[in-house]
Image: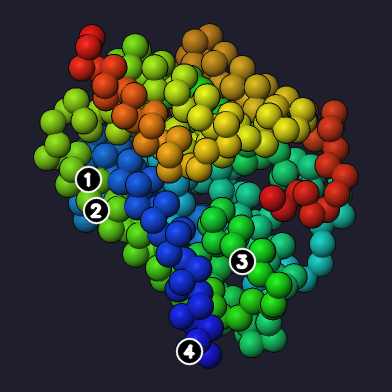
Amino acid sequence: MSIAIYIFVMAGVTYLIRMIPFTFFRKKIKSKFFRSFLYYIPYAVLSAMTIPAIFYSTGSMITSVAGTVVAVVLAYLDLPLIIVALAASGTAFFTGLFC
Amino acid sequence: MKSLFLRGMSHGIPIALGYLSVSFGFGIAAAKCGLSVFTASLISATNLTSAGQAAGIDIIAASGALIEMVLVQLTINIRYSLMAISLSQKLDKSFTTPHRFAASYGITDEIFAVCSAQKNPLTPAYMYGMILVAFLGWVSGTAMGVSAGQLLPSSVSSAMGIVLYGMFLAIIIPPAKKQRNVLFAVLLAAGVSILMRYVFTMISGGFAVIISAVAASALAAVIFPVKDDGEANE
């Protein structure tokens, strides 16, 4: 299948998700379950995307785990996103030099 | 009008700087999937979202079904609907329907966060300024990332593969540390995702993310309903 079709579908869905509620929504969501569900979705999505994929992200289990450990510790210490992301990558790089 | 645009631009600068490194990581990942600078930049320019794009190029690389692409984007990006609803409540009168069509393109986690922190009603000019600067950071970072992925030694580009995931951890860990309900959703989603990867191996990566996230969020919503309306928007 052509990549252009994938991109069109991807961009179209992403745009509609933003545009429809932004343009047409004037009331508040009342369903407590639905509001709660939407509240948890971003965290659950990111978690499911990260685990276990992060352990395969550098092509080496050892360097990925080292990077993950550093990212978890720095994120736990509330450091900014960029610092956590780059430190994870730096750790994976330096670990890779030694093994 | 013009000053509001400039004000939006200045508020967009830290967002753009953050996007540079993240989209650089996306570019590297796109290069690994065999995408060109143009294709990857086009994806970034038309989608303007990190997690959705990362999942999207995996589906492209795996020649997945279009319905999988639709469902994955829906699941990963549905949070933008909530943000859009929240922002729609605080728009200035000058925000006519055509402006809503245009500005909704730029609702990202970071732009949402900065816009919701504004005390004054949001104007189109302000949002356009911020979106423009963030867009430039996002697309140029992507282009540089793909080029780097093709040029840099593999030791560097493979280490960059962890950048996006590192950012995801930095987004979910601080709230999970403070709120037991978020921790529950995060751990449950990770657990189901591991199960999919190693036990139910016939389920493709995109669907595994959907199933994990929907199951974890639904259960968390039943066990820990969110009380405060404002909390649900963060």
Left or right of residue B133, residue B209 in this image: right
> Badge 1: how crowded within 10 Å, few (<14), some, or many (20+)?
many
What residue do we see at 72% from left, 53% from top? B233
Residue A25's disc number? none
N-term mark: 4 or 1: 4
Pointer 2 residue: B143
Subunit that carries the residue with mark 3: B
Q: Please state which amino acid type lies under the numbered disc 3.
A: Cys
Q: Are the residues under badges 2 and 1 in a single subunit? A: yes
Pointer 1 residue: B146
Subunit that carries the residue with mark 4: B
Q: Is residue B201 above or below residue B21?
A: above
- Point out the frontmost of discs 1 and 3: 3
Q: Please state which amino acid type lies under the numbered disc 4.
A: Lys
Return the residue nearer the eye: B120 or A46.
B120
Q: How far is the residue under mark 2 from the one under mark 1?
A: 5 Å
Q: Are the residues under badges 3 and 2 in a single subunit? A: yes
N-term mark: 3 or 2: 3
What residue do we see at 87% from left, 55% from top? A30
Query: Does dot 2 land on a helix, a strand or a loop?
Result: helix
Q: Please state which amino acid type lies under the numbered disc 2.
A: Ala
What residue do we see at 48% from left, 81% from top? B5
